[in-house]
Amino acid sequence: MREKLTAAGVSKQNRAGRYCDGGGLYLYVKNDGEKVLKAWTFRWRDRITGKLREKGLGRYGKYDVTLRMAREQAAECRQMVRTGSDPISSAHQKRTDAALARSRMLTFGDCSARYVDAHKAEWSGKYAIQFSRSLDIYAAPLMPLPVADIALPEVLACLEPHWLTTTETAKRVRGRIETVLDWATVHQYRRGENPARWRGHLEVLLPKPDKISKVKHFKALDYQDMGSFMAKLRANKNMSARALEFLILTAARAAEAAQTPWSEINLEDKVWTLGGDRMKSGREHTVPLSPPVVALLESLPRACDYVFPARSLDKGITDTAMLKLAKQISGDKDLTQHGFRSAFTDWARDCTNHSHSVREHALAHVIPDRTEAAYARSDMLAKRARLMVDWASYCDMEPGEAGSVTPIRKKAL
């Protein structure tokens, strides 16, 4: 017998239990004394295993699944059972097919934008811009394509023109394409293997990056020449010279130093605290200020919100101004501001006994080893303060005096 239940009876039934409508359709009622929950299920016996199986049809309610709707779903399930289909896996397949149908209207560009929106909270603002811009430029042919249709030929068409000429950039773009396609697969907007996967896939089609592109390090000033360089730098009275001096003594990145607002500086506690939105790692970073840096900051006028203002006073000085001055003083057209961080690292490694972890914290580097990072939760501010005082003292040496320093890893002749 079927249709044993009535709409009025189902509506009024609050007693906990299972009530059969017939044809495998059941109403489950749960009552814990405070709240009544009602739901529909379809039960059938598997022809192969002989076991009873059950498929949920949804919650009962005026705006959910009514008795009539539940009977219609049960009828579909009975037809599947009669034809040998599985009501559960068939329903899943229908949902997957529907998601893929929707993905035909969803492009790679759409998925890229959604992926960035989902993850930008954990990134720095600069990285989010770089992620999107690199795909806009180097993956432009993929952007208007339905994400479900992207396969190996389309990925190779983006990568091959740049793989031998701008290898490092192409390598990063490949990883970002792979990430976006993985995101689309997890959301069921596409199926199958990721065509941008490197291991066991693209690595057999494209030459290995480290075999065709040698890493070019930033040109750095020899740390033994820092005394001479700093003497010339301090003789220059321009704002760009003060910004470059600040950058060197704090071992900061160029953009971080140039755009420093006074709100980040605490001269009383002698620290400079950068927000996560200004850091490459996306995490807040505190820099201890040595006495020479404090003296430098105290000597500057507070004409606007920025420590090293541009002439317009509405923003910080540009990286270009510092770079131009560094090249002019050193006489080396290939010198970069980032090279001063390398000089700091070389000096700390060769001439001091400060630990590797302290040096890495001073440079705001992310520790790749998770175990080591777990034990290095402290920012080691006191230890880093001593390191920065030592670095400032070394930079204060008279020209020629720094050259007499014997690295601790070498023997004096």
Image (cartoon, rainbow, N blue to C red):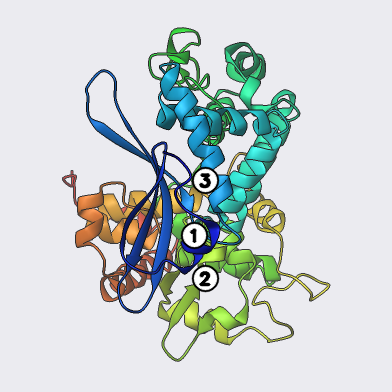
Say which element carries label 3.
helix
Amino acid type at circle 2 is: Gly
Say which element carries label 1.
loop
Please name the residue shown 52% across and 50% down the image. Answer: 338
Number of dots carrying numbers: 3
Q: Can you identify the residue that label 3 sits on?
A: 70
Please tell me how crowded label 1 is: few (under 14), some (14-19), or many (20+) other residues with Cα within 10 Å. Answer: some
Please tell me how crowded label 3 is: few (under 14), some (14-19), or many (20+) other residues with Cα within 10 Å. Answer: many
Horizontal side, residue 330 vs residue 272: left or right: right
Please tell me how crowded label 2 is: few (under 14), some (14-19), or many (20+) other residues with Cα within 10 Å. Answer: some
Q: Earlier in the sequence, mark 2 or mark 1?
A: 2
Mark sitting on residue 282? 1
C-alpha separation, residue under disc 3 versus residue under disc 1: 51 Å
Amino acid type at circle 1 is: Gly
Report which quarter residue 22 is drawn in: top left
In the rendered image, the quadrant that contains the N terminus is top left
Horizontal side, residue 362 vs residue 143: left or right: left
In the rendered image, the quadrant that contains the C terminus is top left
Horizontal side, residue 132 vs residue 61: left or right: right
Q: Earlier in the sequence, mark 2 or mark 3?
A: 3
Report which quarter residue 54 is drawn in: top left
Q: Determine whether 34 is above or below 48 in the image.
A: below
Q: Can you identify the residue that label 2 sits on?
A: 275
Picture coordinates of residue 102, whole percent (x, y): 67, 33
Q: Determine whether 206 is above or below 335 in the image.
A: above
Say which element carries label 2.
loop
**Front residue of 12 and 307:** 12
